[in-house]
Amino acid sequence: MNNKLNSLARLQDVLSKMFEIEDAINDIPKSLKDKQAMLSKTKKAYVDLCEKVDRTKKELASDRFDFDEATRNREKCEKMMESITLSKEYETLQKEIEEAKVHESELRMKISRKESILKEDLIKLQDQEEIMKAQQAEVEEEESKIDEQLALKRKELEEVSKEKEACSADIDPNMLFKFERIIRNKGGKGIVPVHGVVCQGCHMMLPAQFANDLRKQTEEQTDDWKFCPYCSRVLYYEETDDSETQFNDFANLEPTSTEEEESSPVSDDIIDSDEFSDI
Ligand SMILES: [Zn+2]
């Protein structure tokens, strides 16, 4: 790699580091927000469960009252049985006692069901309380850490920005701007070699004439830059053991008429209109 490419490769590393720090700065408040959202969700579930427990307790009290009343009613009827002389009265009372027993047993079942629900809910409530305490502690810890983390990252960013200034001094501002965009959009890889006629960034085959021009440009170390028409990355030509064969094989297949070249997608305009359309 020549000097021009070396300085762009160095700039690529610095920019990647810079973007990583910027993303981390943006993510710091996000992680607090995520933790706060989780806590408020737990709090809501806790409040809902508290309300459910209160409801069950009230229902249980009312069911127990009904049960006691049913029991008292049955006992009263049973006592009345002792002083009964007429068989018709006896039958009526007997029927009443049977009905009271059924009612009692229904209420007993209802109470027992509600008691087990209440027991389960109280255990859940205790668990929720512990989760809530742990999440609350996490939020508080995050809040105290956040300022410290942000200050640290901002310092790192300041240092890396100085590095950027230093290694981009010789790069044309327009090119620097484009290159920053490419690094941002292409996950940190903004400058890639071409082997034969293949872009090593997107593995697309480039037109032979384009690859040939790039090869010359790389050899002569001119000040121009070429961008991949498919992935927009900055390209340089790199000789490999079989690049000659690849290049020739492909060159033989490529039509070379001027008309074809004119309609080829390769032109600096494509980079300007697609990748940087919102500038
Ligand atoms: Zn490419």
Image (cartoon, helix red, strand yellow):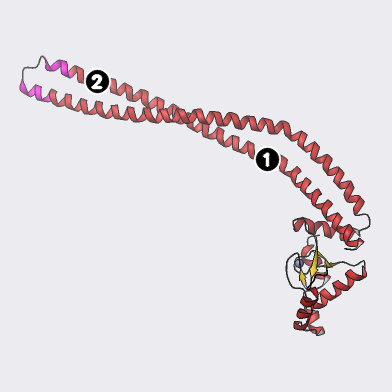
Residue in the foreground of this view, choosing between 268 and 201: 201
At x 84%, y 39%, the residue is: 155
Secondary structure beneath dot 2 equals: helix
User: How many numbered tags mark residues here?
Assistant: 2
At x 22%, y 29%, the residue is: 102
Give the crowd class for mark 1: few <14, some 14-19, many >=20 residues within 10 Å: some
The residue to which callout 1 is attached is: 31
Indicate the quadrant where residue 74 lies. top left
At x 68%, y 37%, the residue is: 32
Query: Left or right: where does residue 113 sit relative to residue 18?
Result: left
Q: Amino acid at mark 2?
A: Thr
Indicate the quadrant where residue 140 lies. top right
| Residue 44 pos. (x, y %) | 54, 34
Q: Amino acid at mark 1?
A: Ser
Q: Are marks 1 and 2 in contact (CB under 8 Å)?
A: no
Of callouts 1 and 2, which one flags the residue occurring earlier in the amino acid sequence? 1
At x 40%, y 25%, the residue is: 58
| Residue 105 pos. (x, y %) | 25, 27
| Residue 26 pos. (x, y %) | 74, 44
Query: Left or right: where does residue 236 sit relative to residue 92?
Result: right
The residue to which callout 2 is attached is: 71
What range is drawn magenta here? 77-92
Give the crowd class for mark 2: few <14, some 14-19, many >=20 residues within 10 Å: some
Say above or below: 147 vs 227. above
